[in-house]
Image (cartoon, rainbow, N blue to C red):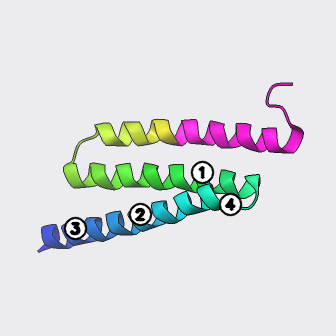
């Protein structure tokens, strides 16, 4: 019984994350300003990280957890760099 509930919950989570990724992609492509596009990119990497975590739970493979950690770190650095570029016009002073 618990395996069926876990499988259903993981399937629903993956579907919800796929819809969220589609909305983030639309915001990234059609954002009226650059700040909206950066926010869409930030949301997209968070959703992709969560999708890998859910997929790791489904398969039981720990490699997906390590890859999602790398995506989280690189996504944070990219978001900070893009925000600094939008604020000052340059990344490295």
What is the distance, in whole Å, between disc 1 and disc 2 at their CAs? 15 Å
Element assignment for label 2: helix
- Is residue 79 shown in magenta? yes
Badge 3 or badge 1: first in the primary sequence: 3
What is the distance, in whole Å, between disc 3 and disc 1 at their CAs? 30 Å
Disc number placed over residue 31 in the picture, else none:
4
The residue positioned 29% from the left and 52% from the top of the image is: 55
Residue 23 image position (x, y, % from top left): 52, 65
From what the image shows, is residue 79 above or below residue 18?
Answer: above
Element assignment for label 1: helix
What is the distance, in whole Å, between disc 2 and disc 4 at their CAs? 20 Å
Q: Mark 1 points at which residue?
A: 41
Q: Name the residue under label 3.
A: 6
What residue span does the magenta drawing correspond to?
72-93
What is the distance, in whole Å, between disc 3 and disc 2 at their CAs? 16 Å
The nearer-to-camera label among 4 and 3 is: 4
Q: Mark 2 points at which residue?
A: 17
């Amino acid at each position: 019984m618990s395996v069926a509930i876990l499988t259903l919950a993981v399937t629903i989570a993956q579907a919800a994350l796929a819809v969220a990724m589609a909305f983030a992609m639309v915001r990234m492509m059609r954002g009226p300003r650059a700040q909206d596009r950066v926010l869409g990119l930030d949301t997209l990497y968070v959703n992709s990280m969560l999708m890998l975590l859910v997929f790791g739970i489904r398969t039981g493979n720990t490699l997906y957890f390590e890859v999602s950690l790398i995506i989280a770190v690189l996504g944070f650095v990219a978001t900070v760099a893009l925000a600094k570029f939008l604020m000052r016009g340059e990344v490295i002073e």
